[in-house]
Amino acid sequence: MTSKSAAAAARATVYGYPRQGRGRELKKAIEGYWKGRVDADALRATAAELRRANWRQLAEAGIQEVPTGDFSYYDHVLDTSVMVGAIPGRHRAAVETDALDGYFAMARGTQDVAPLEMTKWFDTNYHYLVPELGPDTVFTADSAKQVAELREALALGLTARPVLVGPVTYLLLAKPAPGVAADFDPLTLLDRLLPVYAEVLSDLRAAGAEWVQLDEPALVQDRTPAELNAATRAYRDLGALTDRPKLLVASYFDRLGDALPVLAKAPVEGLALDFTEAAAANLDALAAVGGLPGKRLIAGVVNGRNIWVNDLTKSLATLGTLLGLADRVDVAASCSLLHVPLDATTERDIEPQILRWLAFARQKTAEIVTLAKGLAQGTGSITGELAANRAALASRANSPITRDPAVRTRVGAVTDTDARRSQPYGERAAAQRAHLGLPLLPTTTIGSFPQTAELRVARADLRAGRIDTAGYEERIKAEIQEVISFQEKTGLDVLVHGEAERNDMVQYFAEQLTGYLATQHGWVQSYGTRYVRPPILAGDISRPEPMTVRWTTYAQSLTPRPVKGMLTGPVTMLAWSFVRDDQPLGDTARQVALALRDEVNDLETAGTSVIQVDEPALRETLPLRAADRPGYLAWATEAFRLTTAGVRPDTQIHTHMCYAEFGDIVQAIDDLDADVISLEAARSHMQVARELAAHGYPREAGPGVYDIHSPRVPSADEAAALLRKGLEAIPAERLWVNPDCGLKTRGWPETRASLDNLVAAAHAVRAELPTAD
């Protein structure tokens, strides 16, 4: 096919779409099901209607090939485990009794059975359920979900493409099951897994699938020769099947690198590549392998992870270059649109001028359709769209909102000394022990306490004018009093004020910093039914006035025990926002760090002796390629130190991280120079404690003993057993006792019981120590 005919064949498509619905109907239905207010049939009906609405919306926008199979009640990787029959032994009885309840048991656990481990999906804030595999794993095909959803879309008269997690990525994301040797490599199960994929592909073909997309984002990471050989074998074998649809292998989030020649040579009919995050690298690599003659290329030229309008002229130039490199070039976003909000037009509080700069999922589909039309019919067919796009880009580039000379001058004056504590850790630790007088194995929580319905109603009432500010603040004070009283009675050593006033750990601060925009309806799935509204970082950052001092000092006035000041760190403020793309991330991080530094110093001046600066996103934002990591870690750790280094030696700086693979960043954790770090560890059975010990981490640490992302209440014995595991790696004088993460999403009954058990476990293990009083 010539370049001209390739352009004429250009088709608009996407890999996935937000699942929740305009009013988060899916969240409400699932949580209603968990609470017994919604039955299974009603939940399934809601899900089916949301799928139909998504497909109709995409088709009406001009998307010519809609995705199926991307919809999930909880997580698409968990769906893949169900599809291949990889059900952990402890959950089999529940799944066999009731498939839906068993599915949610794997995701959330029950009082008697622990859930699957949860961690971040590559370098995003989406969490997936980690497959548990072992040498005895037996895979069995269950294509019911994928076939049913394909048939639903076909029944609407749509062209549909099922989307599955690819077999290589699925195995590379998996971990050895509990009780399996830690050095077991799930990739050794590939030959056992491929026949199951073959059966699923055959079922989809029989149901009417012309194409099936197999997502292999793990191949954009550094891969060993053995792993690349596994990809070669996987697509050689799947490509050789006779009873199958056409295969499209999709990658995203970075450049394919050494995996591109493997996939280009594979006997599959198409590839999907990211031309936003790694445009130049993928373009050069594609040209180097001689293109994709005889194959379909889906070009991800619209950023599926950020919310700024696309530069249509630039994307058309990229698409034009690609025309000579494939048999057919189609247009898409760089990845699933799961990672952006649904529709920017619902935002009423953002200035119209700024709203022109934003593209959520619906606007991105329009951009994709426009680009496909321009590619197929020429730029003359989209002159109006191009003119409007140029105007929007110029409006943003020239806006005074984006630049604050005072902020830039302050950043330019930062020196290395500004990011270093005045004394080494050993001297600080001695000063802090004398000042705080804490026992061995001190107990604390991560920061937030349950956000009750009453608190959410109070915030809604304030926004709607049903109560005034004074009435709202009295409600917050009463909640803080309750939280402090509970912690004292439970016996926690270092308290928190509970964060009753905070809607979200990033949004709360963004609303008080210049340069940020907050949305009203910009919901994005983080995990399961947990949705967040990432703020938009549009301009230079500064802090007009203190943000947390008032509530922290009020809480401290209620108790003689130390109350932690609670802040969100600069890297997480970036990672869980939609960041500006017009300057280096390191520059933006320094701006945020200086604003937070002012808050840290004001907390200390107000009498706060323990200050926690959370950085749960430090590992999440780690570049997928090792070559890109040193530069990132240099500015990321510097930004944390810039935030925290201005305090006295006897002020104890904490940080917190959760639900990530920490082994890759232990040196960076060390480089933060925090006095205490708390980390998720319950689901991973204290793995991080062992990683810290292997590194020789010299500071204090609190690997979590209570998994807060499950409704189950851990017993005191269970928490004590985890604590003893922690002591095998971290000496008692440096070990803290805490939950994995904040308690915002939990209810009060389970929180009370769990923390009572946590404190009881600390007391029991403390009594076992030879140094105990």
Image (cartoon, rainbow, N blue to C red):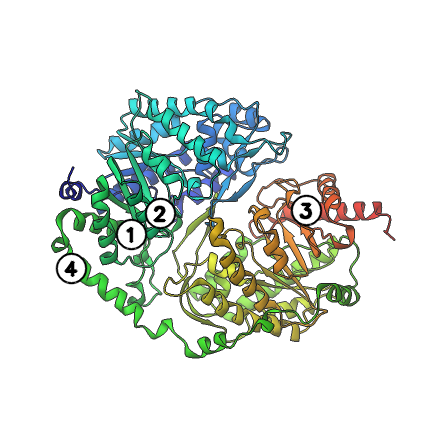
Return the disc, 2 or 3, that comes first in the chain's sequence.
2
Return the disc, 4 or 3, that comes first in the chain's sequence.
4
Residue of label 1 = 364
Q: Which mark is residue 337?
A: 2
Instruction: Give the structural element (helix, strand or loop) at label 2.
Output: helix
Tell which of 194 and 709 is nearer to you: 194
Residue of label 3 = 694
Q: Position of residue 686 (x, y in %)?
A: 66, 43
Tag 3–tag 1 contact (CB < 8 Å): no
Instruction: Give the structural element (helix, strand or loop) at label 3.
Output: helix
Q: Amino acid at mark 1?
A: Lys
Question: In the shown orientation, is residue 276 left or right of residue 378?
Answer: right
Q: Position of residue 758 (x, y in %)?
A: 71, 47
Return the disc, 1 or 4, that comes first in the chain's sequence.
1
Instruction: Give the structural element (helix, strand or loop) at label 4.
Output: helix
Q: CA distance from mark 4 to mark 2?
A: 25 Å
Tell which of 770 and 500 is nearer to you: 770
Tell which of 316 and 37 is nearer to you: 316
